[in-house]
Image: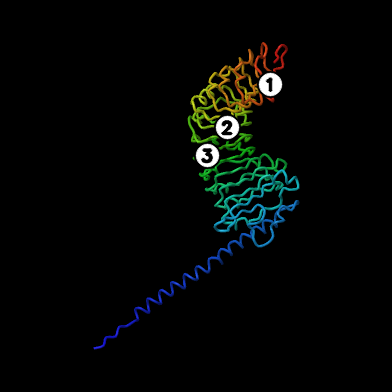
Amino acid sequence: MVYQFSNSGTNMATTIASVHLLFLVIMISGLPFHKAAGIETEKLALLKLKQGLLDPSHRLSSWVGDDCCKWRGVVCSNRTGHAIKLNLRSLEDDGIDGKFGGEISHSLLDLQYLNYLDLSMNNFEGTKIPKFIGFLERLRYLNLSAASFSGRIPPQLGNLSRLIYLDLKQYFDLNAYSNKSSQNDLQWISGLYSLRHLNLEGANLSRASAYWLQAVSMLPSLSELHLSSCGLSLLPPLPSSNLTSLSVLVLSNNGFNSTIPQWFFQLRNLVHLDLSLDELGEITELIDVLSGCNNSSLEHLNLGFNKLGGVLPNSIGNLYNLQSLLLWDNSFVGSIPISIGNLSNLKELYLSNNQMSGTIPETIGQLNELVAVDVSENSWEGVLTVDVSGIPEFQAPYQTGFGS
């Protein structure tokens, strides 16, 4: 008996394998096309952007040819070839004519992989910040500072949940908008929960004066906060905040006219603190708290141009990492604490225009890193016995009988 076995099953398996192989070949062969098509779209988007910009110094003259990754200011991913960074910041070397102006094209939205955008230091002549920038969802870095925009900060920027760095410092053109049109709130920042660096210096935040602390406290990763000259006028007297990760806090020129609130005493990781020009009152407790830890991280302290009075606390000598101490134009009395000699890293000491008296302690002579000292316009007594020959910028007291 002869048995015949059907090979239909084998043929079917072979057919299925062939189909899978063909599908794989099509997919593989199609990848370069899709990648090239995407990059071609990005190149066209950049060319549309160039077309809308005013470029008097021809900074974008390199934006020709097929490879947009070689164009000035454009950085592409080594892995995918997509444009991920666009840096059109105007540099001092570019001069006045080197500033971009004109219109920022919607074509930016076609740069779908863009995570870095810098349009700072340009002159957009009072145009408004484009709302569509808030839909560049991959952005991690955005800098529009000093670019001569106008109007309010578009709340659409609050959509940028991946943003780590946001700089809108003096984004406006003072001659192009009224005070009313420039008033901003801060409700929109609640969506920026990845943010670490926020600079809104000069932005009119008077609308947010009552709740600005609550707003920025919603940013758990924030390490740098710059809100100088924002018209805040109020240091909220809250018992606590969620800003314990802050290393840099700049709140100068807001005219708070208050004492230091309790939540300040929780900021134990500060490296840079600027509360100048704020009409503040007593600060002894603040310095006591800042210096309370043996590993105090504070390097720069600016409390100049306030209404601070009383005697400088001896605890100031516990700020061992301090490099600059600016207390000029206040109403401090008494002498400089002897403990000042503990600040071995101090480079700048400004105590001018106070009401201090007595003698300058010899312990200042122990500060070998000092490069600038101004203790003028006080009522010092006696003869300066400290050797200041090694201090390049030493402003001597303006008083008869006080010499070196």
Marks 1 and 3 sit apart, C-alpha to C-alpha, by 43 Å
| Secondary-structure class at tag 2 | strand
| Secondary-structure class at tag 3 | loop
Image vertical order of residue 74 relative to residue 66, above or below: above
Q: Amino acid at mark 1?
A: Ser
- The circle drawn on residue 272 is 2
Give residue 99's position: percent from left, percent from top: 72, 47
Query: 220 or 19: nearer the eye?
Result: 19
Q: Residue at x 68, y 21 (%)?
A: 389
Marks 1 and 2 sit apart, C-alpha to C-alpha, by 29 Å
Q: Amino acid at mark 2?
A: His
Q: Which residue is mark 3?
A: 222
Q: Indicate left or right for 129 with 189 as reference.
A: right
Within 10 angstroms of label 2, few (less than 14), some, or many (20 or more) residues?
Answer: many
Query: 274 or 369: nearer the eye?
Result: 369
Camera-near label (1 vs 3) is: 1
